[in-house]
Image: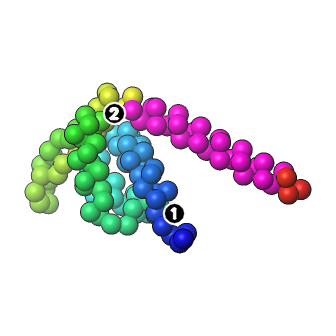
């Protein structure tokens, strides 16, 4: 078993949450999302983002607006729907529960080793 495979699966598991968090700040262009996700080492392949955005849109969690660009074709800017915000709120609560649970297990191991 390779640790890299597990690391990739862990990142994939929270990628949707991270995308929704980025979009929750306000309208955002896909390449800006990609830049932040890449800088955070959450995504390395551009082709991963667009299918996820489509899936989230089809689930009515986000919507987009076309905005004219002075330097090329119109750009698609994404924003959360009301349903998307509620979904994100639930994911955020789950995230904090998972972090607390994981910290508990890690700290319990440390306590047992002392």
Using the numbered discs, state the Cα–Cα distance from disc 1 to disc 2 in whole angstroms: 28 Å
Q: Are marks 1 and 2 in contact (CB under 8 Å)?
A: no
**Is residue 22 in sight in this rendering?**
no
Q: Residue furthest right?
A: 114
Q: In this picture, is 90 found above or below 65?
A: above
- Of residue 106 and residue 2, the one placed in the foreground of this image is 2
Could you tell me which residue is drawn at 41 percent across and 35 percent down?
A: 88
Q: Could you tell me which secondary element the residue under label 2 belongs to?
A: helix
Residue 59, compared with residue 73, is above or below; it is above
In the picture, measured across the screen, residue 4 lies left or right of residue 52, that is right
Which of 8 and 24 lies nearest the eye of the viewer? 8
Task: Identify residue for label 1.
Answer: 6
Q: Which residue is mark 2?
A: 84
> Where residue 81 appears, x then y in whole percent?
29, 32
Q: Residue at x 38, y 66 (%)?
A: 44
Residue 90 falls within the magenta-colored stretch: yes
Of the two numbered discs 1 and 2 on the same chain, state the one appearing first in sequence. Answer: 1
Q: Is residue 97 magenta?
A: yes
* Circle nearer the viewer, 1 or 2: 1
Quarter of the figure that contains the N terminus: bottom right
Tell me: 18 left or right of 52.
right
Q: Main secondary structure of the magenta part?
A: helix
Q: Which stretch is magenta? A: 87-111
């Amino acid at each position: 078993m390779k640790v890299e495979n597990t690391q990739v699966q862990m990142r994939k598991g929270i990628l949707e949450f991270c995308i929704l968090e980025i979009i929750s700040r306000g309208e955002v262009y896909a390449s800006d999302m990609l830049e932040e996700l890449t800088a955070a080492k959450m995504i390395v392949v551009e082709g991963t983002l667009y299918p996820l955005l489509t899936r989230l849109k089809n689930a009515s969690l986000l919507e987009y607006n076309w905005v004219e660009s002075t330097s090329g074709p119109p750009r698609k800017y994404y924003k959360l729907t009301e349903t998307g915000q509620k979904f994100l709120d639930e994911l955020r609560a789950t995230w904090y529960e998972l972090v607390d649970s994981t910290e508990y297990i890690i700290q319990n191991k440390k306590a047992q080793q002392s």
